[in-house]
Image (tube, rainbow, N blue to C red):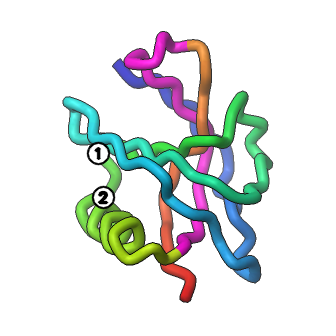
Amino acid sequence: MIVSTNVSAKYITNLGTQGVEITKFFTHQSGAVSLYISGTVENLDQCTSTFRVHIPHDLAGKDVMVSTALAAFASGKKVGFHGSGCSTTSFWGGTVDVPIVNNMWIVK
């Protein structure tokens, strides 16, 4: 079960920064994806944690984002995120919410 709260869309990583590194890639049974990240993020939605971001299973364009994330992960490139709201994933006990991604880019 995944609970999400949408607020207004905001940058998770500023467009002008060098991005963050994807350190782990986790695929959920629902088809959603959690990306563990390392680097500086902006927590404008006040999520309880930012060591991980969430790509919902029903997000339009999710397959392209997942491909983008895998390409960045495999090549060691950094990525940037834009998102909206926070998501709690019950797999981890349901006590931590993380940013929900709705746009992603690779930083060279």
Residue at (46% x, 18% y) in the render:
92
Residue at (51% x, 46% y) in the render:
36
Vertical arrangement, residue 59 with respect to residue 76, above or below = above
- In the foreground, 48 or 103: 48
- In the foreground, 38 or 50: 38
CB within 8 Å, label 2 to label 1:
yes
Residue at (38% x, 77% y) in the render:
75
Q: Which residues are magenta?
A: 78-94
Residue under label 1: 58
Mark 2 or 1, closer to the camera = 2
Q: Is residue 94 left or right of residue 2?
A: right
Vertical arrangement, residue 22 with respect to residue 104, above or below = above
State which quarter of the image contains the C terminus: bottom right
Q: Residue furthest bottom?
A: 108
Vertical arrangement, residue 68 with respect to residue 9, above or below = below
Q: Is residue 74 left or right of residue 17?
A: left
Disc 2/disc 1 C-alpha distance (Å): 7 Å
Q: In the figure, residue 57 lies in which quadrant?
A: top left
Residue 66, image x, y percentages? 30, 61
Q: Which mark is residue 76?
A: none
Residue under label 2: 62
Q: Is residue 23 left or right of residue 31?
A: right
